[in-house]
Image (cartoon, grey):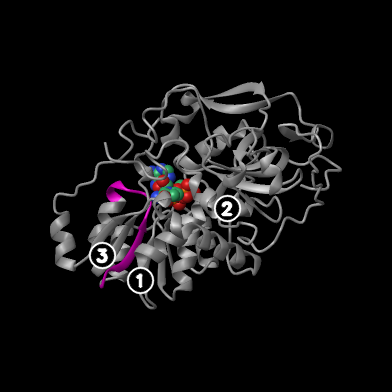
Amino acid sequence: MSSPPMLLRLGRRAAPSLIGRCRSAGTDALFGVRPAVLRRFIVDTSYSAHFMDFKGSSIPSSMKKLVVTKLSQDFREAVSVRTVAVPTPGDAELLVRNRFVGINASDINYSAGRYDPSVKPPFDAGFEGIGEVVGLGLSASSRYTVGDVVAYFGSGGAFAEYTVVPAKESVPVPSVKPEFLTLLVSGTTAYIAMKRLGNLAKGETVLVTAAAGGTGQFAVQFAKQAGCHVIGTCSSDEKAGFLKSIGCDRPINYSTEDLAKTLRKEYPQGIDVVYESVGGSVLELAVNSLANKGRLIVIGFISGYKTAAGITPFNGGMLPVKLLQKSASMRGFFLPHFIEDYKEALRSMMQMFAKGELVCEVDCGDMAQEGRFVGLESVFRAVDYMYAGRNLGKVVVDVAPPTVGDSKL
Ligand SMILES: NC(=O)c1ccc[n+]([C@@H]2O[C@H](COP(=O)([O-])OP(=O)(O)OC[C@H]3O[C@@H](n4cnc5c(N)ncnc54)[C@H](OP(=O)(O)O)[C@@H]3O)[C@@H](O)[C@H]2O)c1
């Protein structure tokens, strides 16, 4: 079976090293700003193993989390809601009360056991979250304190009301904005892939598939920033309008326009760079549309994730000929293989966002049929929503909206 993308086969502990390594190099400087919350420093006079802000945070004794109880690419079949005790952080760990968690296309690859075939259910689901530190271990308290806001990615346990996260794998962020969640995986993937594999030059033509989604929106913006002509595929006029608003020169709503015909007619010279996330027939079309010296970046193949094989068939018999005849190339991109670029990517995007130079579109399901994704159980709806192609921007679930009088959130 071919490899599903994003974090595949690295094991459940592999991905966090991305942030871990960044953090060890000094993430206080990463975002340039320390959290704007009232800091309650802890003076260790007790020599206890950990600190829990039970009073200030009202930490309950139990919580809900989503657990993969059966391997399946059908998320609803694979995952169950469990009520468990709120965990206690170890010495170098933080207990984070999750405010927002991010949905990724690969959540169903994970629940299907495609990441680490050696891991057997039950195991925790969810890649990324953002929230407030409500408890921490002794050594973690040298860098964090109760009330800090952190984002984290990769621990495989984000779909929970509270998550224990290694301190070195957390990133301090200025506030609990869902926009920060868009950058951890989706944004960095586009930034690094475009920079490292795209080799974009001014005036080149770039095609982004699933362009209005979590990672596609960033690929569009970075290609535009590089002075390229950007084409983006999407499935609705609303998404096409959004793509226009972020600088996409030629949004193509493939549900009303024939993608192959449009590319042939409007881009007879071919496409210089493709950021490809869909796979199957779209990938074949992208290969056939490459210009001389074109570069095709395989980001994912979402059209196959819901199948048992995890990938839609790709007719690649003539691929060597097609690449040779155009001196073209096709390369895979897998974020954890670009650890050395991660810190710079995140810092740069945070700065762009702070200056208003980067749109980080979030979709919390406000326009979804059953309304906004609020509460942990709505993760199921949010996954369905993404796989129905409804999302515009990064899909985010509001796990615990603030209650009246909560000044921090
Ligand atoms: N390589 C890496 O390291 C890495 C990291 C992050 C993400 N990814 C990949 O990037 C891609 C996008 O992931 P994401 O989390 O950002 O999701 P997303 O783009 O926010 O959402 C998925 C979008 O894909 C489009 N799509 C096209 N064909 C589809 C199909 N058959 N079924 C469902 N959706 C389809 C839909 O948009 P339209 O309806 O508008 O087409 C849908 O909104 C995935 O392939 C994912 O695996 C890879």
Crowding near pointer 3: few (<14 within 10 Å), some, many (20+)?
many
Disc 2 from disc 1: Cα separation: 36 Å
> Which image quadrant for residue 34?
bottom right
Quadrant, the N terminus = top left
Which residue is under mark 2? Answer: 23
Highlighted magenta segment, given as a residue range: 269-281
Crowding near pointer 1: few (<14 within 10 Å), some, many (20+)?
many
On residue 290, the disc is 3
Residue 125 image point, x, y percent? 52, 32
Residue 89 image point, x, y percent? 66, 33
In-front residue for pair 224/34: 34
Res. 47 visible in picture: yes
> Which image quadrant for residue 163?
top right
- Which amino acid, by three-letter code, is at mark 3? Leu
Residue 98 image point, x, y percent? 67, 39
Crowding near pointer 2: few (<14 within 10 Å), some, many (20+)?
many
Res. 214 visible in picture: no
Disc 2 from disc 3: Cα separation: 39 Å
In-front residue for pair 161/321: 161
**Between tags 2 and 1, which lies in front?**
2
